[in-house]
Amino acid sequence: MKCIGIEGTAHTIAAGIVEDKSSKCQVLSNIIKIYRPKQGGIHPREAANHHATYVAEIIKESFLKAGIDSSEIDLVAFSKGPGLGPCLRTAATAARALSLSIEKPIIGVNHCVAHLEIGIGTLDNCTDPVLLYTSGANTQVIAFAEGKYRVFGETLDIGIGNCIDKFGRSVGLEFPCGPKIEKLAEMGSKYIELPYSIKGMDIAFSGLLTASEQFFKNGERLENICYSIQETTFAALTEVTERAMAHTEKDEVLLGGGVASNARLREMVETMACDRGARCFVPQKDLCIDNGAMIAWLGLIMYKSGLRMEIKDSHIDQRFRTDMVEVNWRGK
Ligand code: ATP
Ligand code: FE2
């Protein structure tokens, strides 16, 4: 079975085509285009205009790259949510138009669950992980428990990527700031104590962001601040992930989202996993960030499990929660 997935929750408009081979995911194409605001944060309407401009081109390119014709597609999947309304609507509209024109069924999927399922689908021996999902807008620890995907911990304010980007912008770095801060952090030599805020299983980053900006204004070396931001925030993420693993008794951890590109975050999570006798998995980079292949793959496994959606029900849901997803493609 072949499925095309269209992603459009936030910065990224993307289309990917996947096929299932012995229950594993084969990615035939994965075309990604990212909207980068000239300054400031993301403006939903401008991002949606960007997506509307490029979505047809990206779909065409995904067919070309996969080397298949639209008649060979069996299913059209799209990101139903969570995300920014105008962006989601643009991707869903494109998916509906495609589904109607090629006369193939449509299915809307949860973006966060897609980040997890693409890991299981593409990585050997990754079967039931705890996902540490760290992107711009999202920071969640997700795992399958008692018949549902559940969020065990999440940010109470901003996503870790947003925290890093906001600090970066306040000191004059260009978006996306994550990779630049990672380089600066490598040159840091002193740990500055920053707010380490875990409440129950949830994390807050805005206190740390304000404190970091204050240290910069007071003349602290940028390298030391970047180093301390990474050490503090990544330690908190690792702690919550470890607690979710202990609670669910799972011995696999999967990283996802743009911040998973960070070598120090990977190192910390790998060390934690190793200490617990668990294994750590990271999908390849274009499957870690927002992409169409993960949407296609989740759509495909949902459809194969018997789930169906009519065009008239293919609406978006900006607040589509992970635990609202009906999961009937895996056992208890
Ligand atoms: P969503 O939150 O909807 O999943 P997004 O567009 O914010 O979408 P991604 O593309 O997954 O998410 O991630 C982008 C984020 O990842 C940015 O905040 C960026 O700064 C951060 N990032 C990218 N590379 C690194 C890195 N090496 N270290 C830290 N952060 C990074
Ligand atoms: Fe994402």
Image: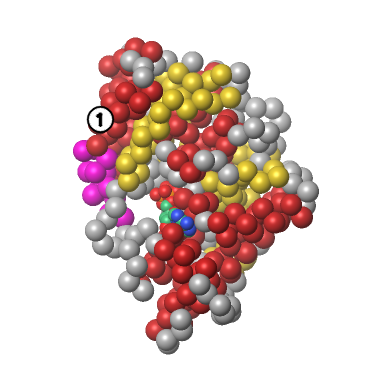
Q: Nearest the camera: 125 or 97?
A: 125
Q: With respect to residue 218, does 195 lie above or below?
A: above
Residue at the spot of label 1: 56
Classify residue 8 as left or right of residue 101: right
Dot 1 crowding, Cα within 10 Å, few <14, some 14–19, many 20+: some
For image coordinates 42% across by 38% down, the residue present is 291
Q: With respect to residue 245, does 206 lie above or below?
A: below
Q: Position of residue 226 (x, y in %)?
A: 49, 71
Q: Position of residue 219 (x, y in %)?
A: 42, 86
Q: Which residues are magenta?
A: 42-53
Residue 43 part of the magenta-drawn span: yes
Q: Quadrant of the C terminus?
A: top right
Q: Quadrant of residue 164?
A: bottom left
**Residue extending furthest bottom?**
218
For image coordinates 51% across by 29% down, the residue present is 298
For image coordinates 77% across by 55% down, the residue present is 275
Q: What amino acid does circle 1 point to?
A: Ala
Q: Quadrant of residue 12?
A: top left
